[in-house]
Image (spheres, rainbow, N blue to C red):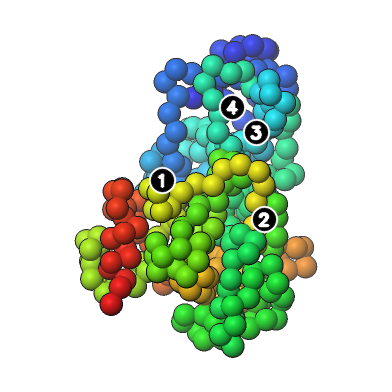
Amino acid sequence: MMRVSDGANLGDGLSYSQEMVLDDAYALTDDADIQRLSIVAATNGQFHVADDSFQGTRGRQIFLDCVATFMPPSGDTIEVLILVEVDEDNNIAEIYGAPLAPFSPKIDYVLVGIDHQNAPMRLAQLACVSFTRGTRITAASGEQKKVEDLRVGDRILTRDDGPQEIRWIGHSTQRAKGEFAPIMITAGTLNNSADLKVCPDHRLFIYQRHDHIGIGRSQLLVKARHLVNGETVTVQEGGFVDYFQLMFDKHQIIFAEGIAAETMQIDTRTRGILPNDLKASVAEHEHQHHQNYEVHESLLDRPNAAALLKRASSK
C-alpha cells in the first residue's frame, strides 16, 4: 500500500479526498502488492464489488471519490482513481487506489491535485474498450476501413445483427503507460490478418471448434491483457496512443483486422465519456448475453493461452 512518508498526515495510508492533504509525499510500503478490484455497474447507477474480484467484499457498494494526482521527482504526473467501499451500515470499509500508470518503490510521490469533477470521465476512459489508430474495421460492404476514417452513420458488419450504423465515435490521446498501454496481438496470433492493438480490457470473441482451454463452451470473450505472453502478445509502453471507441445502439461484436472484437458497452462506468446531448438519450446496453461468454483470468493463466485459442478456433 501507499503511506505518507512526509507531510501533515505522516504515516497514514491512502485515504479519501477530505482526509488527503496537498503536498504530502507518499511512498509504497515494502509489502505493497497489486491486486485487482473488479466492480460491476448496476442499472440504478451504483457500483458494487464483483463476484470475481480479488479484493473487497462481494456485493458491497463502491463509490468513486476522486482522481488524485501525484508527482515523482522526475516531474511526470500519475493519476490514481480513489474508490471507497462501504459496509451495510454505509461506514467506510476499505479505500482503494487504482493507479493509471505504475508506481516505483523507494520513491516519494507528492500529492499535487485532487479532482472530483473529472473522476467519472477518467473512469469511463479506463473502462471503455478502444481500438488504436490504424486498426482496420470491416464495413458492411466488406471494405476494410481504418478506424480513424469512420464516421457516425457508417454501416459496419456485426456478427449478430448484420450491417449496423455507428451511433457515436469517441477519441482520446493517452500516455501509453500502465492501464493505458495498449496490447499488441501480432499478425496471425489469433488468425488476425495484421497486427492488432487494443486497450488492455478489450475483449476478443473466439469461436472454439475444439475446446483446448477446457472451458466447456464454444463461444468465448477474452480480454487482451489475459493473453500477454511477452512474445506474440505484448504490452506496448512508451509515448502516446490514440484510442477510438465505437458505439452502436446495442453492444456488438464487429471485425477488426479480420478477427471478432467487441464494441463500446454503455453502462454506469462508461456513460461519463459521452457528450451531454447523448447521455440522456442513450439507454444502457443489454449485455448479459455477451457477458456470459467472458472467460475468467484464472483459466487463461498459462503462457500458451493465445496459441491454444488459435488452435481451438482453426478448422
Residue 287 falls left or right of residue 226:
right
Tell me where residue 82 appears, x and y as whole percent: 60, 36
Q: Which residue is mark 2?
A: 242
| Tags 2 and 1 touching, CB below 8 Å | no
Q: Which residue is mark 1?
A: 230
Query: On residue 252, which mark appears?
Result: none
Tell me where residue 139 appears, x and y as whole percent: 59, 81
> Looking at the image, can residue 288 be seen?
no
> Looking at the image, can residue 38 be seen?
yes
Q: Nearer the viewer, mark 3 or mark 1?
A: 1
Q: Marks 2 and 3, Cα distance to the nearest angstrom? A: 19 Å
Picture quadrant of residue 222: bottom left
Q: Residue at x 48, y 73 (%)?
A: 258
Compare marks 2 and 1 and give the one earlier in the sequence.
Answer: 1
* Mark 2 closeness class: few <14, some 14–19, many ≥20 residues within 10 Å: some
Q: Residue at x 56, y 85 (%)?
A: 142
Q: Which residue is mark 4?
A: 15
Compare marks 3 and 1 and give the one earlier in the sequence.
Answer: 3
Q: Marks 3 and 1, Cα distance to the nearest angstrom? A: 25 Å
182 versus 13 height, above or below: below
What kind of element bears circle 3?
A: strand
Q: Residue at x 50, y 84 (%)?
A: 161
Disc 4 residue type (three-letter): Ser
